[in-house]
C-alpha cells in the first residue's frame, strides 16, 4: 500500500513538472538596444526593440535598461508596463539620469512580466 501511495505521489510530481515545462519553454522574448546618447548629457535617451517570439500573449511586461558610464556602475530605469502579443514587435525609448556622465554603452538588464503565470516574475536578469 505504501508503494502505491509513493508511486501516485511520484506520478503527480512528474505531471506537474511536465505541465510547467510547456509554459516555461513557450515564453520567449528577444530584445535589443537600438541607440543611446553618448554625449555627456543627462538624461541619456535609450531606444530599444522588444519582440515576443513565444507561444503566449504577455501582459505587464517591463524592461530594466541600464547605461554604462565606465565607472563600474549601471544607471538604470524600468519601462512602463506594456502588453506584448504573440509575434508582436514594439519599439520604445526611455530617459535614464546619469548625473552628466557620458555613456559608453547601454543594455537590457532584466525583463519581468505579470502573465501568463499570473504573478510578477523576473525572467531574465543580467549577471
Image (cartoon, rainbow, N blue to C red):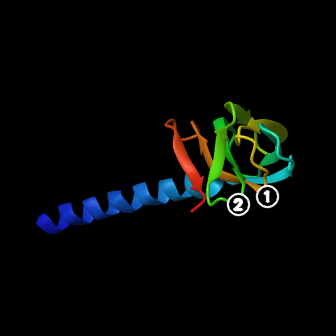
Residue placed under numbered mark 2 in the picture: 70
**Total count of labels:** 2
Residue 103 placement (x, y as % from top left)? 78, 52
Residue 73 placement (x, y as % from top left)? 61, 55
Q: Quadrant of residue 26?
A: bottom right
Instruction: Tell me, yes or no, if residue 34 can be seen here.
Output: yes
Residue 116, label in figure: none
Instruction: Tell me, yes or no, if residue 36 can be seen here.
Output: no
Residue occupying image coordinates x 52% and y 44%? 121
Taking the view exactly as shown, the residue that stands out farthest to the left is 1
Q: Within 10 Å of the Cα at label 2, are there few (<14), some (14-19), or many (20+) other Cα atoms?
A: few
* Quadrant, the N terminus: bottom left
Residue occupying image coordinates x 87% and y 48%? 39
> Is label 1 in contact with label 2 (beta carbons under 8 Å)?
yes
Q: Nearer the viewer, residue 28 or 72?
A: 72
Q: Quadrant of residue 9?
A: bottom left
Residue placed under numbered mark 1 in the picture: 104
CA gap, disc 1 and disc 2 = 6 Å
Residue 29 horizontal side relative to residue 117, left or right: right
Residue 64 placement (x, y as % from top left)? 65, 44
Q: Within 10 Å of the Cα at label 1, are there few (<14), some (14-19), or many (20+) other Cα atoms?
A: some
Mark 1 / mark 2, whichever is N-terminal: 2
Amino acid at each position: 500500500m505504501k508503494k502505491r501511495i509513493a508511486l501516485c505521489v511520484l506520478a503527480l510530481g512528474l505531471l506537474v513538472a511536465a505541465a510547467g515545462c510547456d509554459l516555461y519553454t513557450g515564453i520567449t522574448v528577444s530584445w535589443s538596444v537600438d541607440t543611446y546618447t553618448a554625449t555627456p548629457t543627462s538624461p541619456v535617451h535609450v531606444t530599444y526593440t522588444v519582440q515576443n517570439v513565444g507561444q503566449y500573449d504577455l501582459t505587464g511586461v517591463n524592461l530594466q535598461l541600464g547605461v554604462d558610464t565606465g565607472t563600474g556602475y549601471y544607471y538604470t530605469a524600468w519601462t512602463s508596463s506594456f502588453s506584448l502579443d504573440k509575434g508582436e514587435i514594439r519599439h520604445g525609448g526611455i530617459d535614464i539620469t546619469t548625473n552628466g556622465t557620458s555613456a559608453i554603452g547601454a543594455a537590457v538588464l532584466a525583463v519581468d512580466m505579470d502573465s501568463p503565470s499570473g504573478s510578477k516574475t523576473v525572467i531574465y536578469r543580467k549577471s
